[in-house]
Amino acid sequence: MNELIGKPVDRVDARLKVTGAAKYAAEFELKNLAYGVTVQSTISKGRIKNIDSTNTEALTGVLAVITYKNAMKLQVSTVPGSGRWAEKDLLPLQNDKVFYDGQHIAIVVAETLETAQHGAALLKVDYDEEHPVVEIEQAMAEAYKPKGGSQYSRGDINQGLQNAEVKIDETYSTPVYHHNPIEPQATIAEWTDDQLTIYDGTQAVYGSRNLIAGMLGLGADKVRLICLYLGGGFGCKGFTWAHSVLAPIAAKQVGRPVKIVLDRMQMFTSNGRRSRTIQKIELGASLDGKLTAIRHATNAETSFVDEFLEQAGRSSSFLYESPNVDVSHTLVKLNKITPCPTRAPGEASGTYAFEVAMDELAHKLKMDPIQLRLANYAETNPQNGHPWSSKYLKECYQRGSEIMGWSARNPTPGSMKEGKYLVGYGMATAVYAGNRGSASAKVRVYPDGHAVAGCCTQDIGTGTYTILTQTAADALGMSMDNVIVKLGDTILPRGPNSSGSQTAATAGPAVRAAALDVRSKIIQKAIADKKSPLFGQTEETIVVEDGRLFLKSDKSKGETYGQIISRLKVDMMEGEANITPSNRDPNKEPNPNRFAREDEEVDRKKYSFQSFGAQFAKVLVDPQLGSVRVSKCVGVMDIGTVLNPKTAENQIMGGMIWGIGMALMEGTMYDPNNGRVVTRDLADYRVPVNADMPEFHIEFLNKPDPYISPMGARGIGEIGITGITAAIANAIYHATGKRVRELPITPDKLL
Amino acid sequence: MQPFSVTEVKDNISGINALSGNSKAKIIGGGTNLVDLMKMYVETPQELIDINHLKLTTIEVHLNGGMRIGALVRNSDLAYAELVRKQYPVLSQALLSGASAQIRNMATVGGNLMQRTRCPYFFNTSFPCNKRIPGSGCPAINGFNRSHAVLGTSDKCIATHPSDMCVALTALDATILVQGPAGERKIPITDFYLLPGDTPDIETRLQKDELITGIDLPGISSGLSSHYLKVRDRASFEFAITSAAVLLDISGGIIRSARIALGGVGTKPWRSYEAEEILKGAPNNAQSYQAAADEALKNAKPQKYNAFKIELAKRTLIRALETTGGKS
């Protein structure tokens, strides 16, 4: 092994990306390509009365105007392995009903993008408009508890609150957020006879292919989906949204390949959002800080066409020790697009409210916020009693407070100053699940000594190509230069979605086991081959370095992968892994790959897998003008083994930057009368810019998780955004003595 | 976009002739605002008259003090010009607080003068808007209006003028040079912009066939101190929530004269002669600043989501006065 795991190697696709050679979904140049532009509803509720396409069709170059009147019929997919269709009760262009602003109601297909755009603008749509439900408050009478595991309680919450010596009872709210990946949604569809090829930006290549096939009435084998690179997704490319099926429909109907790229404004109405939340939190504690009660009640919103719950209270069930806990969620239906997962769904909004409430409790108890968390430290998972697979949160608090200079903090709010600025220090706990799913992978080694690893997952932009190249090269004992990783294509073995921070922990072990499998097969060939210097040896005595297999005891005895395979006169040697973690079903055939088998045999159901971290922020507040500058952010993370410190730091920093956005400026605003999106561009929907950036200090404990996988690594795509928003809000309170419980904390709220 | 043609002109007269000859023609300079609006069908010109080759790219010093700035001078060139930084730091500060480096490199002075409001309802043609379609209504008044104006509004329009540069130019008593079929004329910037009243679609005194050729800045005495302060929701690439351009002439602890303009709060770049009157002859101290700020916002009219702007604008002006006058 070359010990590549944990090395801060550069991204393998960095050069391709900066030179423009990396092809994103919209960039495939197909012959005879036509362009589709979708037309979106301009009401939030009602029916389409009439669509007049006269002017559109009169334009030279317009090939088709597709509406519910002439669109191909779609069906609910029954293909196994289908991903999630974003809006259960809304198949696009199938009828005249409008459920929200920006619903796709037509596609104009033309010879050029410009013609299609102009044709779309010329389409005249008349509606029978109805009065929409636009805000949670309007619909509270119809609020309902969604089915499923979103309600939880232990002990007696009322008793716990009664017994408390100190109580907090406050309501926090978070606005709607949008994902805003830099790469907009894009789909190209091309039919060749009855075979469909789709180039799509998706976080679920395999599931989306199966779903689209099923919706079009095809078998999965008739459709190939390709997604080589993603310019971010953050959840909006996790479910499959209308544009991904509209492109195949349009391509079928005009008999040419069709490309649909949503523009930035359409990105605010076409692919979900993070639900607004109103969270009421009650905490009870004894004077020594022990939590006697935790109540976390969330009101969130969904649409009239599907149910999605922002499970903000989930981690409040287990984050701290407390005998009495009550976590509940209610939903109301609004005439807005269905919400969907958004980076750290649940925890991003939930840890904001919960960790601010904890800070309020600490101030009320006159207790250091870190001490309060330590006083309620959960040594095992209090929700189910399981041991943690690994947890080093105490070390995170300790190291984070050192880097932050926490000991210099005067706990009295408003007591610290730098010039005319008030200074505040805040902290919060970060938490996100350590998810792992099933995955398959193949690794091939060729006679020239290079290897190709393949897995039908995708690189959402986080560095999946890079860490899987490290993983395969490490397992094969090759240099990374000789390993090519192929992702994002349904001809490859099924891999995981890029969601729930599971990709590294799921695809990694599969690629590793496939690589070890082929390595073992090649060693077996060598030791059975009289022409090999390794003939007659046993596998255990052989090591591989830089593509050369040799005896541990005598480096001179050995040969390369290339030499062995060339002599075999085969095209290549192949290893395969297909891993379902914790699959101990005795009736099932044992996994043929022994490395995968050993991995499967670990009983993971005995453990709770969570990543943790401690996030800190220092802010400078101008009390006269209400403006806040985050000057320093510290994140110390316990995420298991760090596969690559560069990509890992990048993930955590990206999450923390989004946390700055959540805390201070982001939020999608809707017209209060008709529920239409008002902030539909990156001027009105503010994301932080470089000038807003603080000094970042990000560290990893890098302690392997012994149970998640043989690699010890949990995923880290989401945890960076948890905790940090609360840390900033807590720092603002510490600076000013003002507790703003409604995000974002803009200057007007601090006047 | 609506299909359009582009006509490149080589001299001012050809530009004016092209404008006169086509009522659906528009001048294009840097295009940083117009092209955005065209993409959204807010602007639908048939013809763009490209004036980028006109000789309006110089900054000249007047013999009697003051400065003439060509309409095609790019915002960044103006902001970084040594003379501007020395003589009119308030203008340089205002320019550099606006947009991003990339936009400032493209945007022209003339274009910045003609920049249109960022009202999201104005930007979205599927909403009514009295600016776009007179008489169609103003959804901002009962809508989400956090970014909207509190000064100079009418029951037809509450859209904020977005420019930073124009706020500084208003405080500096700039004059806008225009040329039309009948020749050249000069319009003081304080007269150039119109309040929305009943005709929010008519924003300036510039006639349809007139071309902005430049800006004259009067000389200012070397004893003046000035400052531009902008409060915004993020540190860069962001329009003002509130801003203030301040010039003060102070001697012997007395404010001899003051010039004050506010941004982010008005339907046009907002000159506050009332606040200037309060400060003239007043002691240079915090009480005077507060009195001036109260006076400047005296007639402010809040909307549902922007009432905070009144207090924030006062504080912004006070801070700008503190920075300029050295007292707090």
Image (tube, coloured by chain):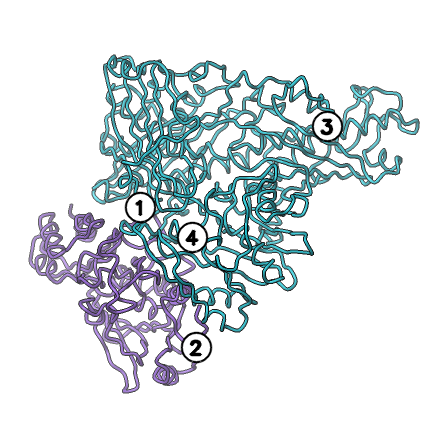
Chain colours: A cyan, B purple
Q: Report how far apart the C-alphas of labels 4 and 3 lie in the structure.
A: 49 Å
What amino acid is found at the position of numbered circle 2 in the picture?
His
Instruction: Evaluate whether label 1 is on the same chain as label 2.
Output: no
Q: Residues within 10 Å of mark 2 (few under 14, many from 20)?
A: some
What amino acid is found at the position of numbered circle 3 in the picture?
Leu
- Residue that mark 4 sits on: A103
- Residue that mark 1 sits on: A134
State the residue at coordinates (19%, 65%): B221
Question: Mark 2 or mark 3, which is nearer to you?
Answer: 3
Q: Report how far apart the C-alphas of labels 1 and 3 lie in the structure.
A: 55 Å
Secondary structure at numbered mark 4? loop
Where's the N terminus of chain A, which quadrant? top right
The chain letter for the residue carrying disc 4 is: A
State the residue at coordinates (38%, 78%): B25
What amino acid is found at the position of numbered circle 1 in the picture?
Val
Q: Report how far apart the C-alphas of labels 1 and 2 lie in the structure.
A: 51 Å
Q: Position of residue B326 (x, y in %)?
A: 18, 49
State the residue at coordinates (44%, 21%): A393
Cβ atoms under marks 2 and 4 closer than 8 Å: no
On the picture, is A670 further left or further right than B269? Answer: right
For residue B46, above or below residue A115: below
- Residue that mark 2 sits on: B53
What amino acid is found at the position of numbered circle 4 in the picture?
Gln
Q: Position of residue A49 (x, y in %)?
A: 38, 60
Q: Quadrant of residue A445?
A: top right
Q: Is residue A727 visible?
A: no
Give the camera-side residue of B7 and A636.
Answer: B7
The chain letter for the residue carrying disc 1 is: A
- Residue that mark 3 sits on: A516
